[in-house]
Amino acid sequence: MDSTLNYEDLAPESTHLVKALTDPYSTMKNQDVIESTAFRNIDWITSKDFEIETGQRQIHEYIKTWGLSSAWHYILDYLGVTKEEFVTFYHYRASFSTPTAQSPIVGTASVYFAVNKVNPETLPVDVHYVIESNRLINRAGKVFFREKWLTDIIESKILLRKKVQDLWTKTDRAPL
């Protein structure tokens, strides 16, 4: 289950996440993070105690702090691991949707997580995430997650699908 991934195996969001976190010239490393009690976080496990399943459990626990409405459902998948010179990233994807009896799946929006074991191993793991089709990298517990981000992704996909169908209709071709 601890499969090592290449960049080609990753979603573009995960690749962006790894590259930004490992780039020595990244502006992220030089940014001051504003501490606030308004941001909710969990007590992340220490690096020495980290296991894939524990990471998955903790991401579930962290997503609960987002305060999403009960309409949202998600699945969390472990995607694999990437190894860099001094860091190892464990990748997860949470796929969100708002199913109803009339529309079981309208669309999905994904959030990609990268969990990094840090040194010394007595420190908690470092967790970052990026929302699908977004370039902004968020650090767990430092950003207030907004439900609207998920809604916007799904609405954008619906609009794109409609435009593609309209184009197919105009060219007298049926979509596959």
Image (spheres, helix red, strand yellow):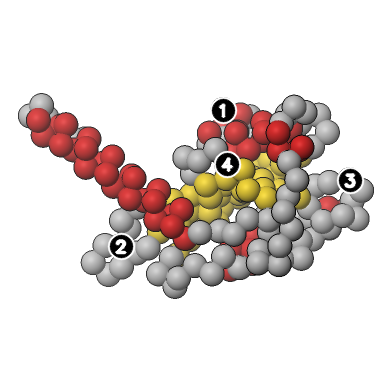
Q: Which residue is mark 4?
A: 136
CB within 8 Å, label 2 to label 3 = no
At 71% from the left and 67% from the top, the residue drawn is 37
Instruction: Give the amino acid at mark 1.
Output: Glu
Mark 2 and mark 3 lie on one chain; the one further toward the N terminus is 2
Front disc: 2 or 3: 3
Real-space Cα distance between discs 4 and 1?
21 Å
- Give the crowd class for mark 1: few <14, some 14-19, many >=20 residues within 10 Å: few
Tell me if I can see residue 110 in this picture: yes
Q: Is residue 42 above or below residue 31?
A: below
Q: Secondary structure at mark 2?
A: loop
Mark 2 and mark 1 lie on one chain; the one further toward the N terminus is 1
At 57% from the left and 41% from the top, the residue drawn is 136
Q: Is residue 68 above or below residue 132?
A: below
Mark 4 and mark 1 lie on one chain; the one further toward the N terminus is 1
Q: Percent x, y for residue 112?
A: 57, 47
Left or right of residue 103: residue 36: right
Q: Which residue is mark 2?
A: 104
